[in-house]
Image (cartoon, rainbow, N blue to C red):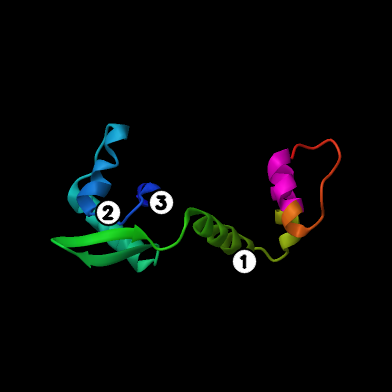
Amino acid sequence: MLRILWQAERPLTAREIQAGFDQGGRVPAITTVLTVLDRLRVKQLVSKSSAEGGFVFSAARSQSGYVVDAMMAALATAEDRSPALLQFAATLDPRDLQTLRRALGVGDVPGEPD
């Protein structure tokens, strides 16, 4: 559901979110959609607002913000973050590594893609 909300350009009704599942072949019941939306709202991942004729829902944070929160929560469980960070960095492709280097002000490494 979050993916559907992240892709939306505006808040969506529960029925519009339900219709977003149509591509996968299996569409959840509207009661299931509402239950999951309520659970996501309690976790502060989804916002619910009054609208003409009912309620609309939107993601409470961006997809990148969600990923950052998940990564930080995972790191918080480690006594020593270094091994986890090193193993994570080892799995990154060269473009992701270059993005991190730029963000850290390390600069370009010869022979790696821009």
How packed mark 2 is, by other alpha carbons closer than 10 Å (few <14, some 14-19, many 20 or more), is: many
Report x, y in % for residue 14.
23, 53
Seen at 52% across and 59% down, the residue is: 65
Q: Nearer the viewer, residue 53 or 77?
A: 53
Please tell me whether residue 91 is drawn above or below residue 37 in the rendered image: above
Label 3 sits on residue: 6
- Which picture quadrant has residue 36? bottom left
Please tell me whether residue 23 is drawn above or below residue 37 in the rendered image: above
Report the amino acid beneath label 2.
Answer: Leu
Seen at 23% across and 56% down, the residue is: 34
Q: Is residue 30 magenta?
A: no
Report the amino acid beneath label 1.
Answer: Ala
**Nearer-N-terminus badge (2/1):** 2
Residue 43 appears left or right of 79: left
Label 2 sits on residue: 12
**Nearer-N-terminus badge (3/2):** 3
Label 1 sits on residue: 76
Seen at 70% across and 55% down, the residue is: 84
The chief SS type of the magenta part is: helix
Report the amino acid beneath label 3.
Answer: Trp
The C terminus: image quadrant: top right
Q: Nearer the viewer, residue 108 or 48?
A: 108
